[in-house]
Image (cartoon, grey):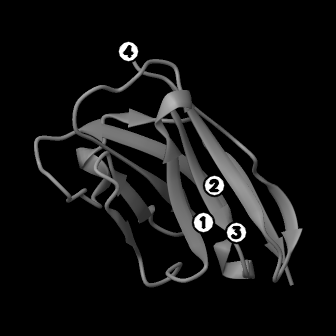
Amino acid sequence: QVQLVESGGGSVQAGGSLRLSCVASTHLSGPVCMGWFRQAPGKEREGFAQIHSDGTTNYADSVKGRFTISKDNAKDTLYLQMNSLKPEDTAMYYCVAYRTISGGYCARHESIYDYWGQGTRVTVSS
């Protein structure tokens, strides 16, 4: 069973930056999609960034141009660099993954993802 462990959350003022990390307990071989979801209080969970093992990335419009998803395959670690943070980015952030047979495309719906981290909280104050 693969475990994902996030770190790097915290409190920051609007306009600031944070970098989240997610370490996988086991190397995920083969085509894999990894990504980040977030859930703000009273809102639905949102899948906003994905990265395929071939390097293809995809972002929701809400974070495009501000957030960057990346991976270090040697360390089995996923990253999320968040810049120009806004109060509406306040949420619990979850690292996710699933093994895929598709090339270059990662699903955004949460039901597709088999592995979830426990979440790390990000709070952005105005």
Q: Residue at x 20, y 59 (%)?
A: 105
Q: Residue furthest front?
A: 74
* Amino acid of disc 2: Met
Residue located beneath label 4 in the image: 1
* Amino acid of disc 1: Ala
* Amino acid of disc 4: Gln
Residue located beneath label 3 in the image: 90
* Amino acid of disc 3: Thr
- Find the distance from the CA under tag 4 to the CA under tag 3: 30 Å
Q: Residue at x 55, y 67 (%)?
A: 68
* Mark 4 burial class by Cα count in 10 Å: few <14, some 14-19, many 20+: few
Query: In terms of secondary structure, where does tag 4 sit?
Result: loop
Q: Earlier in the sequence, mark 4 or mark 2?
A: 4
Q: Quadrant of residue 1?
A: top left
Q: Report the mark closest to the observer, 4 or 1.
A: 4
Asked if the residues shown at circle 1 and circle 2 are in contact, with their CB atoms under 8 angstroms apart, the answer is yes
Q: Residue furthest top?
A: 1
Marks counted in the figure total: 4
Query: In terms of secondary structure, where does tag 1 sit?
Result: loop
Residue 66 in percent (x, y) is at 61, 79
* Mark 1 burial class by Cα count in 10 Å: few <14, some 14-19, many 20+: some
Residue located beneath label 1 in the image: 40
Q: Earlier in the sequence, mark 1 or mark 2?
A: 1
Asked if the residues shown at circle 2 and circle 3 are in contact, with their CB atoms under 8 angstroms apart, the answer is no
